[in-house]
Structures are given as structure tokens and as C-alpha cells.
Amino acid sequence: MSFRDLFSFSKTEKRGVYVLLIIILLQIVVLSTMDLFKESKPIDFSDFEKQIDAFYKSSKQIDANVKSESYTENQLNSELFNFDPNSTSVSDWKKLGFSDKQIAVITNYINKGGKFYKKEDLAKIYVISEEQYKRVENYITINDNRQKFETNNKTYEKESNVVELFDFDPNKTSPEKMLKLGLSQKQINVINNFLSKGGKFYKKEDFKKIYSISATQYEMLEPYIKIENINEKKYSSNVMVEINSADSIALLKLNGIGPSFVKRILKYRSMIGGFYKKEQLMEVYGLTQEVYNKIQTNINIDETMLVKININKATVNEINAHPYIDFKLAKAIVEVRGFNGEFSNVEDLKTFKLVDEATFLKIKNYLCVN
């Protein structure tokens, strides 16, 4: 029998194999679809849920017991006595039964400027439980160091060791006396800065415009503010000031020119060597068109007062010192002078094409050749 004969079937045998395969396939189909025709029964999770609930209640009870034991331990090792939470030491807090964490929170609050003004303020500290607060509540004694004083039938409070109330003129009162009035060093600095910049208190109400003075402080001090009559400066329309020779007193006669503007005008005049036209005043920092319009008819210019630079003698740095002349131009002037000799007149700067027309018109009044 050959190997091929092993896999040869008769017609009848082949039919038998086909029938067998059909039966196997039908059995597989039936078995795989039987579950689809079965009625499913709901799963009962009630026992499992009861076990979960029991475990949750048990964990909560354990947590509560731990907290209770912790608090009870602190309580057992504590003692009760009168205390001021604003000044109680760390060791005293511990004696009272507070934990290190609670003490750290309280200390941090006080170090940042916090204050306990009444008993209930301690209960607001988030790490202190209601039970702990109730336990120490009757022992909290807060020393109120806010001094009370009355004026015009009103009572005011100020945290200070000593507060004296007396008549004062804020335009003249010394820092020492302001401290006695209850003003802080910061407030005094603001007032002094205002006065040093030419500010004035013309009436009582001006004092409350100082941003660091509270409404309560102003109400307290208002009856004691005594300002001498300060007449507004009267400006004469006939006054005439020569701007290149005027001193600070002369400049103050001009309408709209106060001490600050006087300093700026004198400083700028020194920098540029004087003014050759009125409009240059608007180059002074802060001096607006509005201010200029007020004074333009009351000033005149003497150009003989201008300080000039000799471009045949001056160094690069000396020429560059003028605000209108940059280093590049100053260097070019000196280099051309070294190559061609001295300039015969100021207009040579245009001849050698060192400047354009606009720049020349701006600087020519400050230059000379002898």
C-alpha cells in the first residue's frame, strides 16, 4: 500500500465524512447560542455594599479616635491660665495644650502684623478647633494698648504709647512734634516730601489730601490744625525778567514758576550756556506750552549773556559737553580743524558739510572762532 492510498476514500466514505463535519458544526453553533436564550438573573451586591459601609464607618471612627487621643494627650499635659494671644510665648502655648503646628500658625500670623483684638479672633485661626477654643476662651485676656482720646465729643483710638494733641501748622511743624501727634514716620516722610517740592497747606482740608492720612486721623487732628494765612502769590503783568541773568528770586516772580521750575531752569541754562530764544524754555523738563504761554510776555533774552565755545581751541570733549552737539560732530570739527587749520568763521561748518541747515541754526549761537 502506497502513502497515497492512505488518503484515498470511497464514495461512501466521503459521504460519511461530510455528514460528520456537518454534525460537529451544528453542535458548535448550538452550544455558542444557548446563553442567548437563557434568562439572566440580577447579581445581588447588597452584601458587598454592606461590607463597604461597615469599612467606611470603621475608618471614620478610627480617625476620630486618633484625633481625640491626640487632643486628649495635649489636654492631659496642659494647664489653664490667663494669657494674651498677642504676647504669649511658645512655651506658654505648649503649656496651654497647643500643638507645634498650631503655635507655628499663630506665631506666623503675629509676625506678619496680625493682631488679636478680641477673644473671638483666636477662634478664626483655622488650625484651632471649636473644642479647643471653648476650653481656653475664659482664660483669654487681651491687653488693649490702644489709647483713647476725645475731641469734639468723638472718641478716637491710636496704637501708641503717648499721643499728644495740640495746635499745629502742618507747613511748619517739626517731625518730632508730628510724632507726638500720633503720625507715623512714613506719614511724616510723605508730608516733608510734599513740602520740600514746594507744596503748601493753604487750608485745613488740604491736610486730608495727603494720601497716607486716614479719614479717622484727619477727624482727630482737624480741630488742632491752625494754618497761618498764606496769600497766593500775586503776579504783576508788568514784571519783566531777563532769562539769562535772572536769579531764583527773579524767576519766582513769573506766573506759574515755583521752586521746582526755578531749579530746572537754572540747571538747564547752565548746561546749554544760556537761551537765545524764549521758546527754548519749553525744553526744560515739565515746562509745558501752558506754562510758557503764561510767562512769554514777561521775559526777554539778552544774547550777549550766552556762553560760547571756541571751535578753534576747544577739545572734542569740551565741544561734546554741549547738549546740542553729539560726539560724532565734535570729533569731526576737531579733525577738520587739524587738517585744514583754524576756521575763519562759524559758517565754515556748513562749508565743510559737517552739519545740515537745521543743526547749524540750533548750535551757531553757542559757537565762535576767537
Image (cartoon, grey):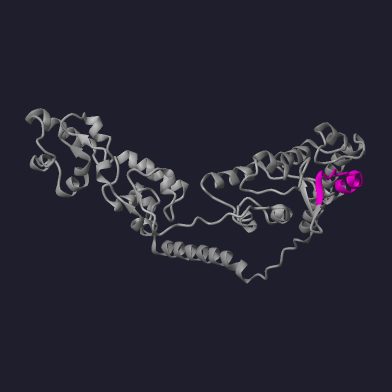
The image quarter containing residue 229 is bottom right
Tell me the magenta residue range.
132-149
Query: In this view of the protein, which residue sits in the foreground, 92 or 13?
Result: 92
Query: In this view of the protein, which residue sits in the foreground, 218 or 300?
Result: 300
Query: In this view of the protein, which residue sits in the foreground, 333 or 240?
Result: 240
Residue 29 in percent (x, y) is at 54, 66
- Let me know if residue 143 is in the magenta part: yes
Instruction: Return the residue found at the far front.
Output: 238
Side of 165 where 290 appears, left or right: left
Image quarter hosting the C terminus: top left
What residue is shown at x 19% (from left), y 46% (from top)?
359
Residue 5 in percent (x, y) is at 36, 51
What residue is shown at x 14% (from left), y 46% (from top)?
356
Residue 256 in percent (x, y) is at 44, 55
- Let me know if residue 184 is in the magenta part: no
The image quarter containing residue 164 is top right
Residue 168 in percent (x, y) is at 69, 48
**Relative to 344, is 168 above or below?**
below
**Relative to 57, is 66 above or below?**
above
Query: In this view of the protein, which residue sits in the foreground, 42 or 24?
Result: 42
